[in-house]
Each structure stands twice: as structure tokens, then as C-alpha cells.
Image (cartoon, grey):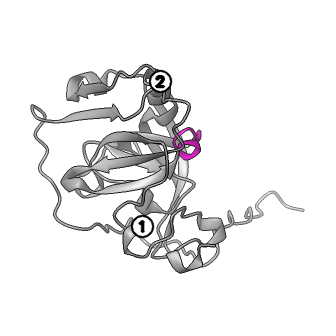
């Protein structure tokens, strides 16, 4: 056989397609970034009872990594092979260990927007708090200065304009989860809506 065979396309989760470009979807206006007022917090029941806060300069100095991951939106588009750069969830868990009773976290963003994920989702290798996408700083409409990237779940869990992590000793639904979206959001199981929950 010749050497010019096209490799098979990477499989997509059920019901997904690859669009042209990267559609922009969010609820509410794009917040204005004010570096002198910005901070990122990890709080709630921590192992040592100590919470953490970083200003913008301090956050940029945290250990960084790059992750290549697909992005799956519940509205049925998938953007393959994004290069994200930022601070991993694992790094933040090491810097501010949760109390052993913690099972979930709330990812908080500007305007009080939140999305709940399991503690294990935060610790996944592909979860990070990104400042860059494909080698460039995030654009404001894609979450500048920091966007959570929880690449193995639908995109509404990857909150734009992220401002902190709240440790939780039980699950609590976030913004879209309270409005009919699935509590877990696994795209490979098509967990789109709350009526699909057990």
C-alpha cells in the first residue's frame, strides 16, 4: 500500500460535529479585566484550615504546563486538539490540599457564575486554569485572563473568567446545573440534561 493513506478521523463523542472556527457562547456580558483588583482564591474546607489567594502577578508565577485536548460543547460542536497553557488543577490541589471530607468543588467565575465538578475531575490530568490557547493569550470572549479547562466534560464546566475554587464536602449544583443541565456532563455518555440523571 502507498504511504499517502489518510489516517482515520479521531472519533467524536456521540452527537458532536467539528465546526468552522471556535464559536463563542456565554451567559451575560464579557467582564472587564482590572489587574489591580483581580485575584484567584482556593477556599472552603482545606486540609490545614488555610485558604489561598493569588493576585494577577502571583498567579502568573505559579508552575505552568501545557495540555492538548479536545473541547466539547453541549450545543454539539467539538474543537479538536486545542493547546491550552496554564496552572493545573493538580498543582492547586498540592498547594492547597483539601480536607479529606471534600468530594466536590465549585469553580467560581466573574458575576457569581459557578459550575460544580467532582474533586476527581479537578485532579484529572487535562484540567487546568488556562491563560493561553494555541500559543496566544486568551481573548476576552474566550475567558481572558483565566479560563478553567475541564476537557473531559462538556464545555459549560470549563468556566470562563475563573476566579476561584471552593472546596465542598457535598455536591451543590452550579448555574447551568440548576437550570436543567446534567450534573456531571460526560460528553461520551451524552450527559446533556438533568432529566437524564438517575
Rendering quarter of residue 166: top left
Magenta extent: 119-125
Residue drawn at (26%, 26%) of the image: 54
Furthest-right residue in view?
1
Q: Nearer the viewer, residue 117 or 9?
A: 117
Magenta segment: does it hold 122? yes
According to the picture, the residue beneath numbered tag 1 turns out to be: 177
According to the picture, the residue beneath numbered tag 2 turns out to be: 47
Q: Position of residue 120 (x, y in %)?
A: 59, 43
Decide if residue 197 is in sight here.
yes
Q: Nearer the viewer, residue 9 or 103?
A: 103
What crowding class fits label 2: few (fewer than 14 Cα within 10 Å), some (14-19), or many (20 or more)? Answer: some
Magenta segment: does it hold 63? no
Height in image: 117 above or below 86? Answer: below
Q: Position of residue 40 (x, y in %)?
A: 27, 34
Any mark on residue 46, and which?
none
Amino acid at each position: 500500500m502507498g504511504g499517502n493513506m489518510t489516517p482515520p478521523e479521531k472519533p467524536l463523542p456521540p452527537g458532536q460535529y467539528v465546526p468552522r472556527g471556535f464559536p463563542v457562547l456565554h451567559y451575560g456580558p464579557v467582564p472587564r479585566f482590572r489587574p489591580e483588583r483581580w485575584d484567584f482564591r482556593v477556599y472552603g474546607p482545606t486540609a490545614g484550615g488555610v485558604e489561598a489567594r493569588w493576585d494577577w502577578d502571583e498567579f502568573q508565577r505559579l508552575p505552568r504546563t501545557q495540555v492538548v485536548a479536545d473541547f466539547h460543547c453541549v450545543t454539539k460542536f467539538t474543537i479538536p486538539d486545542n493547546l491550552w497553557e496554564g496552572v493545573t488543577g493538580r498543582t492547586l490541589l498540592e498547594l492547597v490540599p483539601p480536607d479529606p471530607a471534600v468530594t466536590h468543588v465549585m469553580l467560581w467565575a466573574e458575576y457569581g457564575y459557578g459550575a460544580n465538578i467532582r474533586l476527581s475531575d479537578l485532579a484529572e490530568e487535562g484540567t487546568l486554569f488556562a491563560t493561553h490557547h494555541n500559543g496566544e493569550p486568551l481573548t476576552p470572549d474566550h475567558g481572558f485572563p483565566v479560563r478553567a479547562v475541564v476537557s473531559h466534560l462538556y464545555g459549560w464546566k470549563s468556566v470562563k473568567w475563573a476566579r476561584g475554587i471552593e472546596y465542598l464536602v457535598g455536591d451543590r449544583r452550579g448555574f447551568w446545573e440548576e437550570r436543567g443541565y446534567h450534573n456531571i456532563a460526560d460528553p461520551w455518555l451524552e450527559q446533556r440534561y438533568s432529566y437524564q440523571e438517575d
